[in-house]
Amino acid sequence: MAEIIEEHIEDRLPELLQLERVGLFTRKEIKAVIKKASALEYKVQRRALFKEDFIKYIQYEINLLELIRKRRARTRYFFKKEEIEFSIVHRIQNLFRRATSKWKEDIQLWMSHIAFCKKWNNRTQISKLFSSLLAIHPNKPVGSGLLFTPLSWTALWIMAAKWEMEDCLSSESARHLFLRALRFHPESPKLYQEYFRMELMSAEKQRKEKQEFEQAKMDLDALDYPEEVLNGGLARIVYKEAVSKIKGAEFHLSLLSIAKLFTFAQDLQKEIYDHLQVLHAGDPLTWDFVARRELELESQLPEEVASKQRKAAEVARREERCCAVYEEAVSSLATEAMWKCYITFCLERFNRKTNNKELREKRQERAVDVFKRAHEAMLLSEDLYQQWLDLLLGLGFTETALGVALAITDCCPDSAARWQLQLQLLIRLESSKVDERFEEAVRHLKAKDCLPLWSLWAEWSEGTHSEADTEALFQKSLLATAPADSAVMKEKYLDWAYRTGGRKKAKRVFISLRENRPFSVQFFRRMIQIEKEQETCKMLNLREYYERALREFGSVNSDLWLDYIKEELNHPCGKPENCGQIHWRAMKMLQGGLVEEFVAKYTLLQIGQL
């Protein structure tokens, strides 16, 4: 092994001598580089190899390259790159090659190699790397790491094809990669979308080439430019295959949006549009697209003669045509999703700024009317109700908004979201019916759905009712909510008691609830925090709170034990001699892997690292 290392160090000597000769490095720095390189070489040449050693060696060489670049910029010496940088780059390539052959499953390592090759413009090497990578991992997603985020299962294929198409300018290689990818992922929408885009880009590229040759008056007989390919014939084949494998209007529309990026593909766009209406006539997305398409139609008024008034009238006519399509849609496809598309369109147009008063009023009237009709058809979702109320309040229609808020629970009294929406508005408008509606809500809803309402009720009561009424409300909520939700209300009750009456009142509430299960860890932690915030923090009280918390959660929460130990160590009245007993109890009580976690954290605590 020593002979191999010596040989590798000797191979570095020419570049190091050049670095010293041209003044980029001093002799002392050269010796430091040799010493560091020797240590790294020993690690990557030993019998038991570790990936971290290769990464460190590669990173060192990359840092060395960066240092050389900075030294060159400072000294303005830009010669001898072949003898210096290229030699280091070649060595990094060999290290990457060895690492990826040893740890083939590490996608991040492959991607780092590709990124390095891109930086140094080694195109041939990148194509070979993608080929090797896809041969080993034809159906594996890109893993997450420091530099790379998780990508889809087809991301590697798309990256490789884009490299061939956009950087190597080889549409044929990109096409072969997409066809290979589809054999492994025959139902991948993303693959078909990118393949479709690639074929259109290839056709556009050939059209431009042909145009340039014609302008140069060159003989085109020897060049092969089939008219069908130039008009997107290959893309049409990909489109037909894609829609036969992947159903749904959303995917169909994605292909249409890609085709619309290419001006020469008008016939293909029309074909896709016609198929969309035939294949997905019952999909709200289709109707939404067809309606919005009316806005894209060219104006019949010449640009130079169109005044602001005429432009506004033209926009109004387009919107009327859109609404006519939507009206047809909601009459033939009366679903919540279809109404949502219609309402979304109306809100988008209403939110667009215009100086034309008539157009603005028309948009407002249309938006309010569509909301009302969807509500009457009982096809308005909770999120749209919120938007409707915001719209009405924004327009100053307070009474109408109040009427809508009271009506939304009539058709669906078991919806907690609707009750919450109604009550929030009543509180916002300072209505006198808040208490009455809260009581009605908790009567209609199941206990497991009432937690948001009880929280809202208590929060509102704190600001409007007396302390006695609010406390009675908290106590009532503990009995009315589901057991798991009552633990949350206990936390809120304790917080409220501390805010209104300080530690004394919080202690009284804690004592009244300490045997009333279930609890949450946060309930005890909050009481501990309250005690620690006092000027005279009593260790006796802290021990009681910790002991009660550990009685409930000592088997599933290692942090409680550690905090208890730290309290005994750090509190002026603490007893460090108790820590051993607490540690012994923790080891007996904790379950499964929590024991190891506790031991590790306790060790860090002992050496002052926690």
Image (spheres, rainbow, N blue to C red):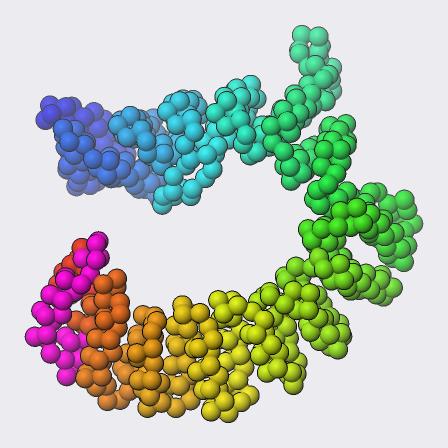
Magenta residues, as a range?
567-595
Give residue 491's quadrant in the image. bottom left
| Left or right of 213 in this view: 360 | right
- Say which quarter of the image contains residue 289: top right
Instruction: Measuring from the top left, give residue 360's x and y in whole percent.
Output: 82, 63
Q: Is 555 on the left or on the right of 181, as rendered?
A: left
Whether residue 205 can be seen here = no
Check if residue 608 falls in the magenta segment: no
Residue for point 36% across, 43% down: 145
Q: Nearer the viewer, residue 207 or 522?
A: 522
Residue at 11% over, 25% down: 1
Q: Is residue 570 magenta?
A: yes
Q: Main secondary structure of the magenta part?
A: helix
Question: Can residue 468 be seen in this snapshot?
Answer: yes
21 vs 304, left or right, is left
Q: Position of residue 584 (x, y in %)?
A: 11, 65
User: Split into 4 quadrants, where in the image is the C terminus?
Assistant: bottom left
Give the residue displayed 33% in from the left and 84% down from the top: 512
**Residue 397 position in % (x across, y down):** 76, 75
Against 358, residue 44 (above or below) is above
Instruction: Tell me what residue is drawn at x 48 percent, y 29 percent.
Output: 157
Task: Tell whether 362 sits left or right of 20.
Answer: right
Seen in the picture, residue 384 relative to 338 is either above or below; the reply is: below
Image-quadrant location for residue 85: top left
Q: Residue furthest top?
A: 222
